[in-house]
């Protein structure tokens, strides 16, 4: 059959890609500039714009066409940390492990005060906060529960996927519309509670969550970035060990004082968001108007340099297009890379791009561009090697992707599952009826240590795993570009985008 023949992979090209990557990879250098040199890449921040401009410049230097920053829509405030320190001053002096919450207020100089202890139950009780407003005035409010002392301490922090796990993969990271609506209500509640703490004239709020353990402090926020959002009060995330130490001292009658200095720069000079986009033009006169896309999100959180989430995906996809272009492989269709903005706040960059190019979110009418996009391939589950791919319930791709993965069995990539995975940028394309995929990756310590934490730095990248991923991504993208037909599509479902309204 013609379909069968066209989906036999060009192993000679795959081998060229593999040899080039293993002999002359630029992954370490790309990773260095996106992380160490650019710093944290919070959406809208100076670090994000530095990384995005560097990526555009690098893609141009490799010879890619139309490399640019493309506006995707309105984002909000630019927020950058200019100075920060936190120290316990009494009953003795010691540094503490904590990080400012993105988009929260600065302290306007060093603010020293007594710590007021708040349990999760008290924090969620608005009447308690109102009744104790006088007690909160002029104090640092510490919210902490109990430390996790269970079996989790004895589980490995990092792992690779076993064959049995790969054989039985279920849907992962799938957020429903109901989940998102509950999240919106939860955010509104916490904004109200934080407002009561601010009204009481507290110095700020410090959260020492039980997940902030063993050196990892998870720092994120889902509000505060919009122009209409109030600045609120200074907020920080603290290591549970420091929070528990302060809690024990207060419980035993000690008065604890801390001094905090948070200097931030908040600006609304440019409230737009920007994706990085570049292309390798197609070489076939009949097919070059059609497109194959690949990418990952460039933005990160602010406590580290966003290495595994998701400089890793950007590094791999940048390396993939570098390989394809430098080898002069002449794809028939145009290959377009996109590095997304605002993924962490709700897939903003990719969703804005999809609405701009492929489908109207109000009428659900698709564009001519949508009909010419063969597929989008995404990488955003850390630094682990690729072990396979999710078809996103597109069963027609099972046999196709199985053939394409076969040459990489010796690299550990063998699994094609019809299950879904969510919560990253391929979902925007899937919503618009475009074949869109996230690769299956070894988790390593992504969920346990680095995802959204202060440990998400260059030294947590696994370079050999990223090289393996670049080989496979480049090969899949190339094979899609030379296929005689577009990849098979699922029926388009007219439904509200799952993250709409965030």
Image (cartoon, grey):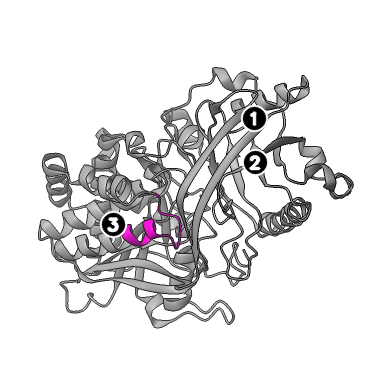
Q: Position of residue 139 (x, y in %)?
A: 72, 42
Please rate how many residues cluster around mark 2, counting C-alpha atoms within 10 Å: few if below 14, some from 14 to 19, many from 20. Answer: many
Q: Is residue 399 left or right of residue 213?
A: left
48 is within the stretch colored magenta: yes
Q: Position of residue 269 (x, y in %)?
A: 46, 73
Q: Which numbered dot is residue 206?
A: 2
Residue linked to disc 1? 243
Q: Mark 1–mark 2 contact, CB under 8 Å?
A: yes
Q: Nearer the viewer, mark 2 or mark 3?
A: 2
At numbered mark 3, what does the secondary structure look like: helix, strand or loop? helix
At numbered mark 1, what does the secondary structure look like: helix, strand or loop? helix
Q: Quadrant of the N terminus?
A: bottom left
Q: Position of residue 276 (x, y in %)?
A: 33, 65
Residue linked to disc 3? 4
Q: Which residues are magenta?
A: 40-51
Q: Quadrant of residue 42?
A: bottom left
* Residue pictured at 22% horizontal, 75% vertical: 288
Q: Quadrant of the C terminus?
A: bottom right
Please rate how many residues cluster around mark 1, counting C-alpha atoms within 10 Å: few if below 14, some from 14 to 19, many from 20. Answer: many
Q: Position of residue 298 (x, y in %)?
A: 38, 56
* Residue pictured at 62% horizontal, 69% vertical: 496
Q: Nearer the viewer, residue 269 or 53?
A: 269
Q: Nearer the viewer, residue 192 or 332?
A: 192
Instruction: Tell me the CA gap for discs 3 and 1.
Output: 60 Å
Q: Mark 2–mark 3 contact, CB under 8 Å?
A: no
Q: Sequence-wise, which precedes: disc 1 or disc 2?
A: 2
């Amino acid at each position: 059959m013609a379909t069968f023949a066209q989906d036999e992979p060009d192993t000679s090209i795959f081998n060229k890609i593999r040899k080039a990557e293993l002999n002359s990879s630029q992954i370490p250098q790309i990773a260095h500039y996106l992380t160490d040199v650019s710093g944290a890449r919070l959406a809208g921040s100076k670090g994000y714009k530095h990384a995005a401009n560097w990526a555009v410049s690098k893609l141009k230097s490799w010879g890619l066409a139309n490399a640019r920053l493309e506006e995707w829509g309105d984002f909000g405030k630019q927020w950058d940390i200019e100075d920060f320190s936190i120290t316990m001053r009494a009953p003795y002096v010691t540094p503490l492990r904590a990080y400012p919450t993105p988009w929260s207020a600065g302290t306007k100089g060093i603010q020293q005060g007594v710590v007021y202890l708040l349990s999760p139950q008290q924090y969620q009780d608005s009447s308690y906060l109102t009744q104790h407003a006088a007690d909160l005035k002029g104090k640092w409010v510490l919210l902490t529960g109990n430390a996790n002392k269970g079996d989790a301490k004895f589980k490995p922090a990092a792992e690779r996927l076993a064959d049995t796990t790969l054989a039985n993969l279920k849907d992962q990271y799938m957020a429903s519309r109901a989940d998102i609506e509950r999240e919106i209500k939860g955010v509104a509640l916490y904004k109200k509670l934080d407002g009561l703490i601010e009204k009481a004239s507290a110095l700020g709020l410090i959260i020492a969550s039980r997940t902030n353990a063993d050196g990892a402090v998870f720092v994120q926020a889902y509000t505060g970035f919009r122009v209409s959002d109030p600045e609120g009060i200074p907020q920080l995330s603290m290591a549970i060990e420091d929070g528990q130490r302060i809690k024990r001292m207060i419980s035993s009658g000690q008065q604890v004082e801390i001094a905090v200095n948070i200097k931030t720069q908040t600006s609304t000079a440019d409230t737009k968001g920007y994706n990085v986009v570049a292309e390798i033009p197609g070489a076939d006169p009949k097919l070059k108007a059609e497109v194959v896309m690949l990418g990952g999100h460039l933005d990160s959180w602010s406590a580290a340099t966003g290495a595994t989430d998701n400089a890793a995906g950007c590094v791999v996809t940048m390396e993939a297009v570098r390989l394809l272009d430098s080898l002069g492989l002449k794809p028939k269709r145009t290959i377009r890379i996109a590095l997304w903005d605002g993924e962490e706040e709700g897939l903003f960059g990719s969703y804005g791009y999809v609405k701009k190019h492929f489908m109207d979110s109000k009428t659900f009418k698709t564009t001519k561009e949508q009909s010419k996009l063969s597929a989008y391939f995404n990488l955003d589950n850390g630094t682990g090697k690729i072990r396979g791919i999710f078809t996103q319930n597109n069963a027609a791709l099972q046999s196709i992707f199985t053939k394409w993965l076969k040459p990489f069995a010796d690299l550990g990539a063998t699994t094609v599952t019809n299950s879904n995975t969510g919560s990253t940028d391929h979902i925007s394309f899937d919503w618009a009826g475009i074949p869109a995929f996230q690769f299956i990756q070894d988790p390593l310590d992504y969920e346990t240590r680095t995802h959204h934490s202060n440990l998400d730095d260059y030294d947590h990248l696994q370079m050999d795993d990223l090289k393996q991923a670049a080989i496979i991504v480049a090969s899949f993208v190339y094979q899609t570009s030379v296929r005689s037909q577009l990849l098979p599509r699922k029926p388009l479902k007219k439904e509200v985008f799952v993250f709409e309204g965030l």
